[in-house]
Amino acid sequence: MSSLQSNADSTNSEPLQRSNPKKRRKIGHTNSPTLVPWRSDTQQRIYSSKLAHALRHVLRRNHPPPPAKSNTGREVRETADRVLAATAKGRTRWSRAILASPLNRWKLRRMHKKVRKAATGLAKRSPETRRRLPVVQKKARVLGRLVPGCRKLSFPNLLEEATDYISALEMQVRAMTALTELLTGGTSHASA
Amino acid sequence: MSSRRSRQQSGSSRISDDQIIELVSKLRQLVPEIRDRRSDKVSASKVLQETCNYIRNLHREVDDLSERLSQLLATIDADSAEASIIRSLINQ
């Protein structure tokens, strides 16, 4: 964990030595060096500015706010996810999955949940050889459903995608929290 | 159906157990629930369970933040919002 922290610091404090800020040092961290460093400040700033720009379009579309349906929250969420996936530069499967099917993702999720509930009752009865503990396999399947686009992935790839997805989500939460605080501070300034 | 099942499992056992252990330990480092506890006795299924819970929590946080952001954005002008955001990002 400390190696990750030192990576984030070194990205900011040594910009001259490292020409490519996305390369990680290999101190004990054997992840593939082309993945996005979600913990760096720079990355969060990049995401925040992209998100602000994208949200502007959402605002424009809803500026005469339709009082009937108030699903702007979902639009914001979808925009945030899409910008997150774009920031990932398409190197991970979950980011490609988000970018590939933005339209029906939410509706598909609800439909899939209902279909799954009907199907799991039938498929569990076969006695299987205990290569991988079935409990772990079941949990791995749940994980595959949570990470977008990773339903049919093999176990180690699924874990890799999940680690990257978690770091990206954490950054998303940090960036959106900062954005919210900014806007809250901004409104009080404007009214004063 | 059962033959397909066993073939699937014999195919997946080609992945070494060590690789799995390494990936699970990497996951363990990320999830704060597990990282802050004593990390010696955590089983793989517990790591997976906590990971799923953590991802669900993160999703819920993002949803809440999206709701708040949408409410804030409804009351604020787009241009001044983006201007103040960019200004603060530069000043950081």
Image (cartoon, coloured by chain):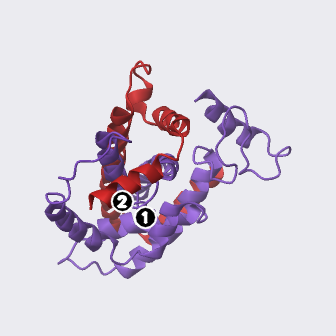
Chain colours: A purple, B red
The image's mark for residue A191 is: none
> On screen, B41 above or below B7?
above
**Residue B68: quadrant of the picture:** bottom left
Q: Horizontally, is A20 left or right of A169 in the view?
A: right
Q: Is residue B63 visible?
A: yes
- Same chain check for tags 1 and 2: no
- Output the chain of dot 2: B
Residue at image location 62% in from the left, 48% down from the top: A37
Q: Is residue B92 visible?
A: no
- Mark 1: amino acid: Gly
- In space, the residues marked 1 and 2 are separated at their CA atoms by 27 Å
Q: Residues within 10 Å of mark 1 (few under 14, many from 20)?
A: many
The number of discs equals 2
The residue singled out by tag 1 in the image is: A149
Indicate the quadrant containing the C terminus of chain A: top left, top right, bottom left or bottom right: bottom left
Q: Secondary structure at mark 1?
A: loop
Q: Secondary structure at mark 2?
A: helix
Q: Position of residue A92 (x, y in %)?
A: 56, 60
The residue singled out by tag 2 in the image is: B69
Q: Position of residue A161 (x, y in %)?
A: 50, 52
**Residue A90: quadrant of the picture:** bottom right
